[in-house]
Amino acid sequence: MDTTLPNESQLREIVENAFERARNWPYEQADTDKARSSRWIEELSGEFETFFSGSILDHITVFRRTSAAEDFAHAGGRSEFLFDVLACQMGTCPPPVHKGADPLDLIRQPLLQVESELDCDTRETAEDLSKLVCGSAPLSLFVGPLPANGPRNYLYVAEQVAASISGEFFCAFIHHPKYWSLPSPAPQLYKWEDTWRHVR
């Protein structure tokens, strides 16, 4: 794997840290599962930002649906960009017209792409996994729910598209937000290597 990207141990730690912070956030009584899911995305994105802050690459942006990035400021800043979370190296170029105007923002290369679907619905899982097939990042992560009987149904669906996802492909599973007030098992992480390997 590219050393500018998290290895499997680092990725497991990123997922575990994000889950713990999202689960222990001081939610209001009226907060919904949707609010908790959004907090999960924000914490996961924050973990990736921390990881990439030590990268040898410059100008890495982590786009996510929960808050706007500074890039593409002409549109007020982009939040979600194709995926729930997308980390990429940004660049600029001078505009072909209006010399002296602000440079144009553009993506130089994707680094990782994440789709998260915590509803216990394999149809929704299939749709989100299909989005990862369309991406070109060297690391893809799908995050799904962790039911009491384990993630085998979701891993089965992921297996159907695994060969079509470019680069390294991981699936992580966390408790659904409606159970976050209860004791929760640790997230589980799996890596596709022509079969699923549990990353421990």
Image: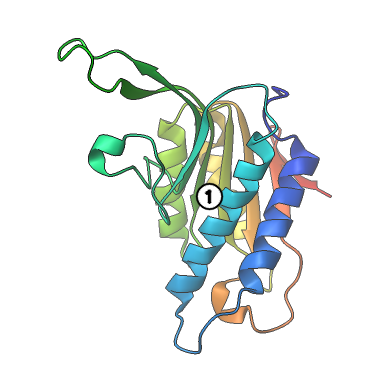
Q: Would residue 180 appear left or right of 38 to someone viewing this image?
A: right
Query: What's under tag 1, amino acid-wise?
Result: Val
Residue under the point 38% across and 46% down: 80
Kindly state the secondary structure of the residue where label 1 is placed. helix
Check the image and name the residue furthest to the left: 98
Is residue 141 visible in this depiction of the protein?
yes
Q: Quadrant of the N terminus?
A: top right
Could you say which is closer to the camera, residue 104 or residue 157? 104
Residue 2 spot, x, y in % from top left: 69, 22
Decide: is 163 above or below 63: above
| Picture quadrant where residue 10 is located | top right
Residue under the point 67% across and 28% down: 55
Could you say which is closer to the camera, residue 178 or residue 161? 178
Q: Would residue 103 appear left or right of 141 to someone viewing this image?
A: left
Check the image and name the residue furthest to the right: 200
Is residue 150 visible in this depiction of the protein?
no
Residue 49 spot, x, y in % from top left: 60, 43
Decide: is 56 above or below 51: above
Q: Would residue 34 appear left or right of 20 to someone viewing this image?
A: left
Exactly how many numbered labels are in the figure? 1
Decide: is 158 above or below 177: above
Q: Which residue is mark 1?
A: 157
Coloured how?
rainbow
Residue under the point 66% across and 74% down: 24
Residue 51 spot, x, y in % from top left: 68, 40
Residue under the point 68% across and 25% down: 4
Could you say which is closer to the camera, residue 76 or residue 182? 76
Q: Would residue 24 appear left or right of 162 to someone viewing this image?
A: right
